[in-house]
Amino acid sequence: MSELAITVLQFGLLLLLWILILSIIAAQGRDMMVSKRARTRAPRNEAPASAPEAESTPATVHHSGKTPRPRPRRLVISEGPLVGTEIELGSIPIMLGRAQECTVVLDDDYSSGKHARLFPQGSRWFLEDLGSTNGTWLGDEQLTRASTVEPGDRIRIGKTVLELRT
Amino acid sequence: MKSQDHDAHPKPRRNIELLLLLIALTIGIGAQVLVGLNLEDTIDQRYWTEGGVQVALALAFHIALRLRAKYADPFILPIVVTLNGLGIAMIHRLDFTNQYDGVADRQLMWTAVSMVAAIALLVLLRDHRRLRQLTYISLAVSVLLLFLPIVPGLGQDIQGAQVWVTIGGMSFQPGELAKITLGIFFAGFLANNRDLILLAGRKVGPLTFPRLQDLGPLFLAWLIALGVLIVQNDLGNALMFFGLFVAVIYVATSRISWVAIGVAFVAVGAVLAYQFVWHARNRFDIWLHPFDDEIYDQLYGSHQLVQGLFGLAHGGLTGTGLGSGSPQIVALANSDMIIVAFGEELGFLGLSAMLVLYLILFSRYMRAGLGTRDHFGKLLAVGLAMVLVLQVFVVVGGITRVIPMSGLVSPFLAAGGSALLANWLIVAIVLLISHAARRPIVVGPMLNTTGEGASGTEDPLRGRNTGEQDPVNESQGSATAPALKEGESFRE
């Protein structure tokens, strides 16, 4: 093979390498911009289950444009087998579930052993699902990540509904 | 760009992967044929069989993904296949020199073994969350793997680093696999204890330091890894394990104090190593004064580094062309210094393209971690991404005199079966994590698992063994009821 042909092929190889890179970047499209989307949108307004989440720690979950409310002091069970039960909120996380070691032992066939966890961060309380079978619902939406709970929000675990009160 | 709607069902995107895979294979096999053309080797049956093996392996992997992890990241496999193919081509090119012979065939064989192992892991594991159950077993296995080379009779000392194990004529670097097992341990441990480490702690100025008792097992693991590596004289791996540790703990807690502690530890470690380890002092001297005649001429001197720099300079912008340079002047040109061989023969354009490929691969690993919903998967993906990027940094940084040189090999490129196997297994794990991240969630009807009329006790093992935490089904399986589970069968 002539020297020229080989040189052309060598450059072709370099070109192909960059073509691969450019096609990967082109095909990625908006994929890498998800984190930006997640940061700018209001978390409650869209279906949380469908969009991939970018933030991992509860400390980075933001609520845009909400003024801080008074700190919740009680957790009240408003529906379900244990209706009327009240728990004082301190500064330690609260475990919800059927297991005996939970802070709030739910007598509910539809809840899991360690179903969900409420924990304080700053002046807010966050709710996190612990991989339960039937899921944890905040308002009308199923939790996919730790999310803030405001007083009056309905937390549904199985047939039990809980609320934070100030 | 076709708008890919995130709010609708995500697309599997396997066809894009196939297309990119074809470009990747063309690059790898084309490079090898170019080497043959340029060195006036006859392009015979052998080239086509070797190329055919690569095509078959890549397609097998692609089909396995189609069947078992439909929503896995479509970019990881093509990038890895490109790098692996280029590595084989360069090793093949160096086989034409006097120093090396038959290394390319061995590399191709190891590629086959690694890819088959990765496919097997992909098919058998199915869900990365099952690895979480192996948290403490991983710690034990890591210790075993790291200690194997210093067991008398098994271990072998090559070039001052005692990291090899020889069993029946086959030598292997068990420390490479410890990257994976330690990554699993760090991720599993921190996923379990994240809140404790995050919430409890003592505040010192702006930084919050965690309590010592929360970190006991983690520090123990880290000390063992580091101790063994210092005994083995393998500074590159020590740096990598330490970086993995700091990165995972930083991501788990989002506390900057960890990075501060980490940098302080590296500084102290570097001073101590310089004072007491001859091997390390030697590397420092080479790094700081490579052009000193005395250091250049001594045994284990800076000859390798300096010739590597000359090689990179010789490559220029477009390189000498595959087969036209003289990369064999540098010692270990087909393993530790293979980056130099690429820099010389493909030039700045080629080498920077490969570094960009590493960067994209790293970003895809991180993307898998960002997308997945469980803490363990996030931490594991980030840890494995750090393993990749630290290897590249230590190798390229060492060659270009940014940091002292230490014995790590560039992932997927360099000759060496153990590293190749470990890196392919990492690819399989990350692909599983990205599959979990992108697949659509189908929420089944509510289940009564323990109360009156519960049916969940029929087959309690089924739910437990899949390691699933929520009733997530493959989209094709959504018509059938999700696996039934008992209330207690969740994570820890």
Image (cartoon, coloured by chain):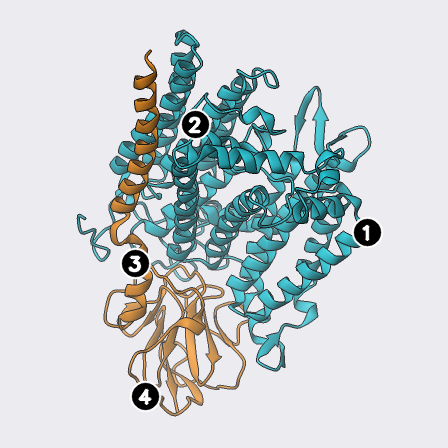
The chain in orange: A
What's the CA distance linking mark 3 and mark 1?
Answer: 48 Å
The chain in cyan: B
Residue linked to disc 1: B276
Task: Name, please, the residue furthest toward the left.
Answer: B2
Q: Residue B92: where, in percent of width, then height?
A: 49, 20
Between tags 1 and 4, which lies in front?
1
Residue linked to disc 3: A33
Label 2 crowd bin: few (<14), some (14–19), many (20+), radius 10 Å: many
Label 3 crowd bin: few (<14), some (14–19), many (20+), radius 10 Å: few
- Name which quarter of the figure residue A162 lies in: bottom left
Label 4 crowd bin: few (<14), some (14–19), many (20+), radius 10 Å: few
What's the CA distance linking mark 2 and mark 4?
Answer: 64 Å
What's the CA distance linking mark 1 and mark 2?
Answer: 42 Å
Residue type of the residue flagged with mark 4 = Thr
> Residue A12 or A40: which is nearer the viewer?
A12
- Name which quarter of the figure residue B201 lies in: bottom right
What's the CA distance linking mark 3 and mark 4?
Answer: 28 Å
Residues at discs 3 and 2 both on one chain: no
Between tags 3 and 4, which lies in front?
3
- Check residue B130 in the rendering and tell me which mark sits there, or answer none: none
- Check residue B320 in the rendering and tell me which mark sits there, or answer none: 2
Q: Residue B82: where, in percent of width, then height?
A: 39, 32
> Residue B351 or A117: which is nearer the viewer?
B351
Q: Is residue B291 left or right of residue B477?
A: right
Q: Chain of mark 3?
A: A
